[in-house]
Image: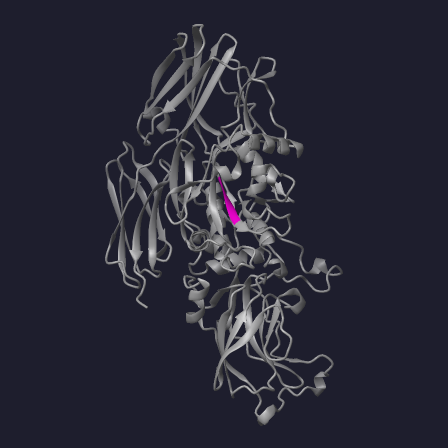
């Protein structure tokens, strides 16, 4: 989201808009004369009551007191981190006790050219002087040491502030010298009722703001897989990396307290499609210029690499975008969670129809099919009020950083109120129509004749958005939140929602499909990579006429986006189904038929179609092949700041060697990202990798290990440990 340079803004703005928080010159002078006082008349030092000029000698940000109260103890950094709308304390040591006549204030400045009327220069006053947007009070005064209580406005700018004590000398204000150790990081505050991101439930705050480990759901709706993900929002350098992203976007400093604007910028900046953002998307099998998306264990390495180089990181897919974006949001204090939508529609015409085309013989028409159904798609939700919208649209909002469609010129999506999506109010910003289609499209199956004419033969209104999951609060269990996005299919509320969506221009399919007395289903048994696939095709005849069916089974390896990576098998067969009877046909797909063509994909798709006279039936199933596990074990007593060991083991039970194997592990608050490379792991060989670490943070923690190679992706394992809290 790079904007114009300062030179091109001349004539439009009195001064260039401040857009940098981390890198700018110190614009706050140590001595500043009062307005109307000529510099030649300025006396930097003036006598105060009693003849001794007041001078601030030391500023203590009282981190030990503030961090626990602001839930920021886990941030691995030297400076104080607090949340807006909540009081923090700081101690100033003066050269003498305060007198009633002393005139001073404490300043908080952010960005270049800080300005009081823009909220980037805050002057907290005491005594008879009028107070600004932040309030302050003297809590305690003991001799020359004074304890102040400062409460930032609940809508204050979020970022890194410089802190000064400014004292009136008669002719001007004398400030303390610049001291980077007193810089203050200010975050959004889910504990403050006046903050737009307020979340009233403490368990949810612990999960959606403070939990630095998570689970991202993948696989298919019938075979959900879990991917551990380390968010690591408190790790060293991550908060600065998040601010760096905002700086790179050239978001004005003044807008960084507005959660709606900030998450919209973040959604665009996670991808590099048009703004030099954090990650490069890649859905091919060629990851030679970077790391495969399947090889990441968490967000920290990606964010730190981007902040250190300014170059987009290669490569990402939807769950990586969602995982890194979740880290960005939680790090800044915004309640956020990762969502997985199963059977997620992505059609290219902006309507509520996902068209799947088939040839006259029942085989998929891959050449002419343009729409796709992703096995799953991951996005994020943030909890916030929407002051820009009518009441009732606050709460969870969809934000999606995977580059799919542009929104106001950038590849981004949201925030879109979940309640607006559920009720079909698609007129509200941002991008409600796009998200609505992802969870509500009808799948229209069309047969294409030799002249190219299309005839619908089936419409499935339940397949898209079949299941929407997120991690449960306080546990590793799944939380099915489908009902927050949609009413039950066919209910009066659902019909009203769909009618509203049509009124806003979303075209639906109204094809009248006759009730068929013949149907077909495919059941696929769970299967580990390298094993034969067992499936059963069952035709059911509910009519009184015998049915002779010519059937076709299509077997594909697919990307999780629904795009065919490789077609590996066709089976044509005939069945006869007696009236009011079912007939099942078992199939075994030998492992060698798909194994050599898998590459980075682990999804098999089976489409069975059957024709009996003018009747055409169809069913499809996606099988997520299961991967073997890594064994992760610990040694040593789990104690804070005491060395422990972790061991990762893997035995290659495949009949073929694994080449170019990358092993990774990390654990938030325990061990930073580590990696190890193996040129080859022969069949039946076992590898062992050991690392030592020193736990930095207490509580329930996790170390995740992941193995990735060309032959098999996403082999993972984890171990949990409970680090006791220190005695108080």
Q: Quick one: 592 or 150, which is closer to the camera? A: 150
Residue drawn at point x = 42 percent, y = 65 percent? 68
Q: Is residue 276 visible?
A: no
Q: Position of residue 441 (x, y in %)?
A: 56, 30
Residue drawn at point x = 50 percent, y = 11 percent? 615
Q: Quadrant of residue 135?
A: bottom right
391 relative position to 224: left or right: right
Figure label count: 0
188 relative position to 28: left or right: left
Q: Is residue 151 visible?
A: yes
Question: Farthest residue toward the right?
Answer: 11
33 relative position to 64: left or right: right
Residue 297 in magenta stretch:
no
Q: Quick one: 567 or 124, which is closer to the camera? A: 124
Which residue range is magenta in the image? Answer: 378-382
Q: Quick one: 24 or 536, which is closer to the camera? A: 536
Provide the major secondary structure of the magenta segment: strand
Question: Farthest residue toward the bottom?
Answer: 51
Question: Farthest residue toward the front?
Answer: 492
Quadrant (top left, top right, bottom left, bottom right) of the C terminus: bottom left
Residue 381 in magenta stretch:
yes
Q: Position of residue 60 (x, y in %)?
A: 47, 76
Figure colour scheme? one colour
Q: Quadrant of residue 256?
A: bottom right
Q: Position of residue 510 (x, y in %)?
A: 61, 22
Q: Position of residue 707 (x, y in %)?
A: 34, 43
Residue drawn at point x = 64 percent, y = 62 percent? 18
């Amino acid at each position: 989201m790079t904007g114009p340079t300062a030179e091109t803004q001349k004539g439009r703005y009195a001064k260039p808009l401040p857009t940098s928080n981390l890198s700018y010159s110190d614009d706050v002078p140590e001595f500043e004369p009062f307005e109307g006082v000529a510099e030649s008349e300025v006396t930097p030092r003036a006598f105060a009551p009693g003849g001794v000029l007041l001078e601030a000698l030391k500023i203590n940000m009282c981190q030990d007191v503030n961090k626990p109260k602001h839930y920021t103890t886990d941030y691995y950094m030297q400076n104080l981190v607090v949340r807006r709308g909540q009081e923090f304390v700081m101690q100033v040591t003066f050269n003498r006790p305060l007198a009633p006549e002393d005139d001073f204030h404490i300043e908080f400045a952010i960005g270049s050219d800080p300005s009081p009327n823009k909220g980037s220069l805050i002057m907290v006053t005491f005594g008879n002087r009028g107070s600004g947007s932040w309030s302050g009070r003297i809590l305690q005064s003991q001799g020359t040491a004074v304890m102040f209580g400062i409460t930032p406005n609940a809508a204050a700018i979020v970022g890194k502030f410089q802190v000064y004590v400014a004292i009136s000398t008669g002719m001007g204000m004398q400030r303390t010298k610049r001291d980077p150790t007193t810089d203050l990081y200010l975050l959004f505050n889910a504990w403050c009722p006046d903050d737009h991101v307020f979340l009233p439930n403490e368990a949810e705050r612990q999960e959606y703001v403070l939990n630095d480990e998570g689970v991202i759901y993948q696989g298919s709706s019938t075979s959900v897989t879990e991917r551990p993900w380390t968010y690591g929002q408190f790790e060293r350098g991550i908060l600065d990396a998040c601010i760096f992203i905002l700086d790179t976007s050239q978001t004005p400093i003044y807008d960084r307290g507005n959660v709606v604007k900030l998450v919209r910028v973040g959604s665009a900046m996670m991808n590099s499609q048009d703004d030099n953002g954090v990650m490069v998307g890649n859905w091919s099998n060629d990851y030679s210029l970077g790391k495969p998306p399947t090889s990441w264990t968490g967000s920290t390495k990606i964010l730190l690499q981007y902040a250190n180089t300014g170059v987009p990181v290669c490569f990402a897919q939807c769950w990586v975008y969602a995982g890194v974006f979740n880290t960005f949001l939680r790090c800044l204090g915004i309640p956020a969670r990762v969502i997985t939508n199963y059977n997620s529609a992505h059609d290219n015409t902006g309507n509520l129809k996902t068209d799947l085309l088939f040839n006259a013989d029942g085989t998929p028409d891959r050449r002419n099919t343009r729409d796709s159904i992703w096995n799953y798609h991951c996005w994020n939700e943030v909890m916030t009020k929407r002051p820009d919208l009518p009441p009732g649209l606050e709460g969870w909002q969809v934000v999606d950083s995977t580059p799919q469609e542009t929104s106001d010129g950038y590849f981004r999506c949201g925030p879109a109120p979940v309640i607006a999506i559920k009720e079909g109010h698609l007129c509200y910003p941002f991008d409600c129509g796009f998200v609505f289609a992802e969870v509500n499209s009808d799948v229209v199956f069309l047969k294409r004749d030799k002249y190219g004419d299309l005839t619908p033969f089936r419409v499935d209104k339940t397949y898209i958005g079949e299941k929407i999951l997120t991690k449960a609060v306080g546990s590793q269990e799944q939380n099915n939140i489908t009902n927050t996005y949609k009413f039950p299919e066919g209910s009066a509320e659902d019909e009203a929602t769909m009618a509203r969506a049509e009124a806003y221009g979303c075209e639906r399919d109204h094809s009248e499909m006759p009730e068929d007395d013949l149907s077909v289903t495919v059941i696929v048994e769970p299967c580990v990579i390298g094993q034969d696939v067992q499936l059963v095709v069952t035709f059911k005849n509910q009519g009184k006429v015998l049915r002779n069916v010519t059937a076709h089974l299509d077997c594909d390896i697919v990307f999780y986006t629904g795009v065919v990576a490789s077609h590996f098998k066709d089976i044509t067969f005939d069945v006869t189904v007696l009236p009011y009877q079912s007939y099942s046909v078992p199939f075994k797909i030998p492992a060698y038929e798909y194994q050599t063509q898998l590459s980075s994909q682990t999804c098999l798709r089976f489409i069975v179609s059957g024709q009996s006279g003018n009747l055409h039936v169809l069913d499809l199933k996606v099988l997520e092949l299961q991967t073997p596990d890594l064994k992760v074990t610990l040694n040593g007593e789990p104690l804070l700041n005491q060395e422990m060991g972790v061991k990762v083991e893997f035995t290659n039970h495949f009949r073929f060697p694994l080449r170019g194997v990358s092993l990774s592990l990390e654990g938030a608050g325990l061990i930073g990202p580590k990696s190890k490379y193996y040129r080859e792991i022969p069949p039946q060989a076992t590898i062992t990798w050991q690392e030592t670490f020193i736990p930095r943070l207490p509580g329930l923690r996790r170390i995740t290990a992941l193995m990735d190679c060309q032959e098999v992706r996403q082999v993972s394992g984890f171990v949990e440990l409970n680090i006791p809290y220190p005695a108080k």
